[in-house]
Image: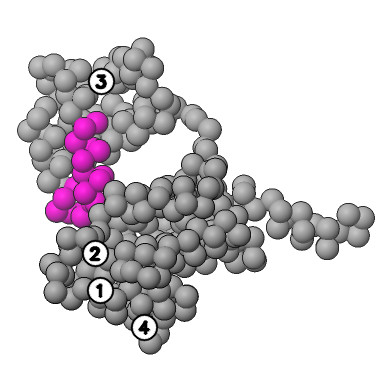
Amino acid sequence: MQRHIDKFMNYLKIEKNASKHTIINYGIDLGSFSVFLGKADVADIDHLSLRRFLAEMRSRDYSKRTIARKLASLRSFFKFLYREGLIKANPVTAISTPKFEKSLPVFLDEAKVARLIQSPSDADETGLRDRAVMETLYSCGIRVGELVGLDSDDVDFISGVLKVLGKGHKERIVPIGEPALEAIRKYIDKRDKSRIMDKDAVFLNKSGRRLTDRSVRRIIDKYMRVCSIAEHISPHSLRHSFATHLLDRGADLRSVQELLGHMNLSTTQIYTHVTLDRLKSVYDKAHPRA
């Protein structure tokens, strides 16, 4: 089993160019399946083996979302084995994915976003950095991993765009607003050049190295407390707010999909559930008996 898992993981890294997080999660999911099987040969695995594995997870009170993720990992794994001729039949085709309710994205209204972004002090480098981080997340709707991966060459101050390296190492160009560009300019000008360790990175920590995902989360948490905003949000919530506010102001779904870097329109469609106010406004203006 492990030999086949190793082949699959190499395929993800080399051919699929999968993200680090994807590779880690697939490794965890396939590892737990391998432990469950014990010394069983991969050729002997059938849909009953998979059903027993799913039943084991349910008995341990795994959430439907976790079970669905593990099943997705197994689906990709066995599809690869079948395509490579390593198994004669794909056992996952007989298994259906458990259905679960999609949770609506958590977002802030426009007034709270403005309050959050304007809360850092502009008197020191840290405050300027934090302001630039939040301005950029909200202005571009990029993921936190995309933000911390930004290099100086990725910011085009003249054209007003960023070059972003997204999931699957796919590059895309996204527009960035003038307030965010100005915040980045001020931060870069204020940086202590003598202690910069990573000369390419846009956003740095106190040691002069590239900022991490976890550091960005701490930044957001800090200013949520400063602003006394009750909602429990993450840095990703600024991405949700970006998409929701665009749709509320009339942007079309396809454009928002491109800006977010979603492969499928269905991923973006979840935001249509949180734009009811705009739909009601359109209805009130357009319907003769509204």
What segment carries the magenta color? 12-29
Whether residues under marks 2 and 1 lie with C-beta atoms below 8 angstroms apart, the answer is yes
**Residue at the spot of label 2:** 204
> What x and y, as percent, mark residue 74?
27, 32
Q: Determine whether 239 is above or below 79 in the image.
A: below
Q: Is residue 271 left or right of residue 203?
A: right
Nearest to the observer: residue 153 or residue 32: 153
Which percent across, then down, holds residue 226? 47, 52
Label 1 vs 4, first from the N-terminus: 4
Q: Residue at 16% across / 41% down in the picture? A: 8
* 111 or 81, nearer to the observer: 111
Instruction: Work out whether mark 2 precedes mark 1 in sequence or the reverse, and give the earlier one.
Output: 1
Q: Secondary structure at mark 2?
A: loop
- The residue labelled by disc 1 is 191
- Where disc 1 sits, the SS reads loop
**Residue contact at pointers 3 and 2, CB within 8 angstroms:** no
Which residue in the protein does label 4 denote? 157
Residues under numbered marks 1 and 4 in contact, where contact means CB atoms less than 8 Å apart: no
Regarding mark 4 in the picture, which secondary structure is present there?
Answer: loop
Q: Quadrant of residue 150?
A: bottom left
**What main secondary structure does the magenta stretch of the protein show?**
helix
**Earlier sequence position, callout 3 versus callout 1:** 3
Question: Label 1, label 4: how many angstroms apart (C-alpha)?
Answer: 18 Å
Between the residue at mark 3 and the residue at mark 2, the CA separation in whole angstroms equals 50 Å
Residue plotted at (21% across, 73% down): 192
What's the residue at 25%, 20% (across, down)?
A: 46
State the residue position of label 3.
Answer: 46
Mark with earlier residue (4, 2): 4
Circle 2: is it few (<14), some (14-19), or many (20+) Cα within 10 Å? many
Earlier along the polypeptide chain: callout 3 or callout 4?
3
Q: Nearer the viewer, mark 3 or mark 1?
A: 1
